[in-house]
Amino acid sequence: MRIRELWRISRAYLLPLALVGVFTGIVALVRAWADVSNVSMLYLLAVLASAVLFGSRPAILAAIASFVAFNFFFLHPRRTFAVADSEEWVALGLLLISGVITGQLASMQRERAREAERREQEAIVLYDVVRLMADPDLQSALNQVAERLRTELHLGAVLLTFGPAAPVQVEAASGDAESVAQAREAAGLAEMILSAGRAPTAGERGAPGRWIRIVHPGARAAGPATRGDRVRTVPVRLEGQPVASLILVRAAQAPQFAAADDRLLSAVAHQIGLALQRLRLQHETAETEALRRTDELRTALINAVSHDLRTPLSSILASAGSLLQDDVRWSEAQRRGFAEAVVDEARRLDRLVGNLLDLSRIESGNIQPEKGWYDLGSLVNEVAGRLRWLTSRHQIVLDIPEELPPVFFDYVEIDQVLSNLVENAVNHTPAGTEITVTVRASGQQVEVAVEDTGPGIPGDSLPHVFKPFYRVPQQAAAQGSGLGLAVARGLVEAHGGRIRAENRSEGGARFVFTLPLTQRPAEAA
């Protein structure tokens, strides 16, 4: 390491002297062929080359060497450092001043060019970091950022750890096993600081990171630097507080971090902090949205309980109370009417409570259909038969093909979907109108449609009919809690299908839902 460094420094000063020697020979050849008064300006080329290749100090050395060489070899008396003519002093002075200024200017341009290259590389790395952090898979994104930094800075390992205050608790690492293990050892102090929930003290702080020395058992007190000298940590801050640590391990025999590397690491840590802030804001937004929807559902549920549940309960209580009156003689037809009213309102209450429970499961994401292979046509016939008491004042038409393939679905949940759609059609159409249920297999899905010949759905209400507790304003007098369609949508989507509402061109509404057609039972076997 030291020999290479010494050779690099020696070369930076020896080669400019060699260039001056080469141009001394060129000046001698030019003076032998022609008497050129300003031939000393050729030395400026050596100064320029030294400045561009090696920097400011070698360029100054080249300018002084040019001054000495021109004086020693070309001014009278030759082979001495004396100058006979005072005018030659002016020429020598101009040569030295021109050489120094030219060298400084060329060196400044060289540094600016290198700085521009470094800035460009930093911008590329930061762009890559920002692009990678946009990946929704945070673990993969952090691993790629660690690998990008390790490759860019030629490191042995890069480790990114998060403290308890961070919105995520993952670890990203890149590098060889030994260097990664060394980085994890160094993470101990960083984790203590992050767990304490405080910023580093003046003794712990660095700009932008700090060196950590790891003392291993049995290590000698004197001698070469321990492995801990190769470890560097950079804090990642969220809202001013350190929540993570970026730990870097230099490769063996690698040079120390430069100021440009410090700047790049600070910028990368800042970008990671911004990504964590975005993640926290996303979590807070999701929680706020969940609370808002919960509050809306709670309010709607209270409204439903205060009206939709009390209405059937009141009818049940009134009918049951009438049956219990001993001072009134009811005819058999009247008693049967009271009993039918109790049964009808109990059924209505049962459907309402069932829809409320289903909606609660849907909103919480706990819908997990227990699917099996069933005949969808048989299910439609069963629903129509069970709801005959509800549809007795309507004409029900079933259009089911004989060659309908078996479908993979949850029998109870799709039964609920069909029941809700038929009940919705009954509640929003006049008595005596027709309700049609059609089943068709089309491509990779089966389509079920429930159509009516009622007033249809107002255009401004079509986008909202599947929202919980929504009722069409123009049909507010119609029975229904506004839950059936919302539950139907949730159950259909849990099966991987879709549901939509539309108006028929000949009048009335049409509700269509689809279920995917997967492998047939014989094919699956």
Image (spheres, rainbow, N blue to C red):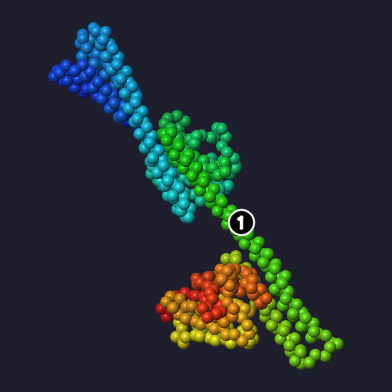
Q: Which of 92 and 343 is in front in this view?
A: 92
Quarter of the rendering containing residue 322: bottom right
Q: Nearer the viewer, residue 173 or 376?
A: 376
Query: Quick one: which residue is furthest to the right in this view?
Result: 327
Q: Residue at image x 29%, y 16%?
A: 94
* Residue 213 sits above or below residue 98 on the image: below
Q: Position of residue 99 (x, y in %)?
A: 30, 21
Q: Which of 128 and 97 is in front in this view?
A: 97
Quickly name the residue at label 1.
Answer: 288
Q: Where is residue 389 in the image (x, y as percent from the top left)?
A: 64, 86
The quadrant of the image that shows the N terminus is top left
Is residue 417 visible from the viewing direction of this image? yes
Query: Quick one: which residue is furthest to the left in this view?
Result: 33
Determine whether the residue tagged by mark 1 lies in a helix, strand or loop.
helix
Task: Count the marks.
Answer: 1
Q: Where is residue 235 in the image (x, y as percent from the top left)?
A: 52, 41
Q: Residues within 10 Å of mark 1 (few under 14, many from 20)?
A: few
The quadrant of the image that shows the C terminus is bottom left
* Residue 89 sits above or below residue 131 on the image: above
* Residue 105 sits above or below residue 420 on the image: above
Which residue type carries mark 1?
Answer: Thr
Q: Residue at image x 27%, y 27%?
A: 49
Q: Residue at image x 21%, y 16%?
A: 37
320 left or right of 407 in image: right
Is residue 369 visible from the viewing direction of this image? no
Q: Where is residue 318 in the image (x, y as percent from the top left)?
A: 78, 81
